[in-house]
Image: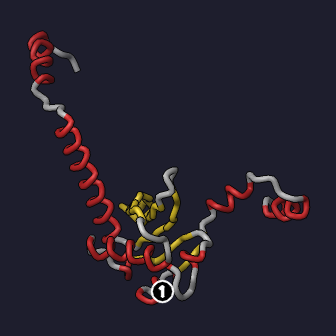
Amino acid sequence: MTLNACSVKTMPKKIKNIPLSNSTVSRRIKDMSIDIEATINERTKKSPFSIQVDESSDVSDLSILLVIARYLNVNELEENLLLCYPLTKRSTGEDIFNAIQGYFCEKEMDWAKCCGVCTDGGKSMSGCYKGLRGRIKIIAPHVTWSHCCVHRQSLAVKPFPDSLKEVINLSKL
């Protein structure tokens, strides 16, 4: 693309006319994030999806619930952050379920389209009655459950006693 002399002279004027105040930039970032969230929600509504749920604490000891959605989009598997929610009171299975259920209700997402849930082995996640697993099974009994393998990978970098090294080495075969 070549620029003529007239367009080069008018560029600084056009750039000066672009509003870049803090409120404008903030508003545009918010508009973009709303658009991205709406796109992800529409895609999860159109196809079967699975979620990966993890509760973590940040540096200030605030518990944060992260939900990642995996779904098909034009015959390709995509993965995006669906929900990042602070758990201000507690992080029990009920609290985690209520946060996810509230989001699903607000965004009109259907548990019938959810085909799988992946979590770590924490009691609040994997409990069959009071944990997230038990609560999801009540409203979506078809959902399959899997354990998050990311945590197994983090264990592999820690030093093990000799009795456990043999087990790790066997799993590499």
Vertical side of 7 occupied by 24: above or below: below
Vertical side of 156 occupied by 12: above or below: above
Left or right of 114 on screen, residue 2: left
| Quadrant location of the C terminus in the rendered image | bottom right
Q: Quadrant of residue 83?
A: bottom left
Residue found farthest to the right: 162
Question: How many discs mark residues in the rendered view?
Answer: 1
Q: Residues within 10 Å of mark 1 (few under 14, many from 20)?
A: some
Vertical side of 132 occupied by 59: above or below: above
- Could you tell me the amino acid type at mark 1? Lys
139 or 59: nearer the viewer: 59
Q: Residue at x 90, y 59 (%)?
A: 162
Q: Residue at x 13, y 22 (%)?
A: 16
Q: Residue at x 50, y 75 (%)?
A: 92
Q: Position of residue 18 (x, y in %)?
A: 13, 29
Per the image, label 1 sits on a secondary structure element best described as helix
121 or 1: nearer the viewer: 121
- The scheme the figure's colours follow is secondary structure
Left or right of 16 on screen, residue 25: right
Q: Quadrant of residue 95?
A: bottom left
Q: Quadrant of residue 155?
A: bottom right
Q: Residue at x 43, y 85 (%)?
A: 140
Q: Position of residue 100 (x, y in %)?
A: 39, 73
Disc 1 target residue: 137
Q: Position of residue 153 (x, y in %)?
A: 68, 57
Left or right of 170 on screen, residue 101: left
| Quadrant location of the N terminus in the rendered image | top left
Vertical side of 10 occupied by 69: above or below: below
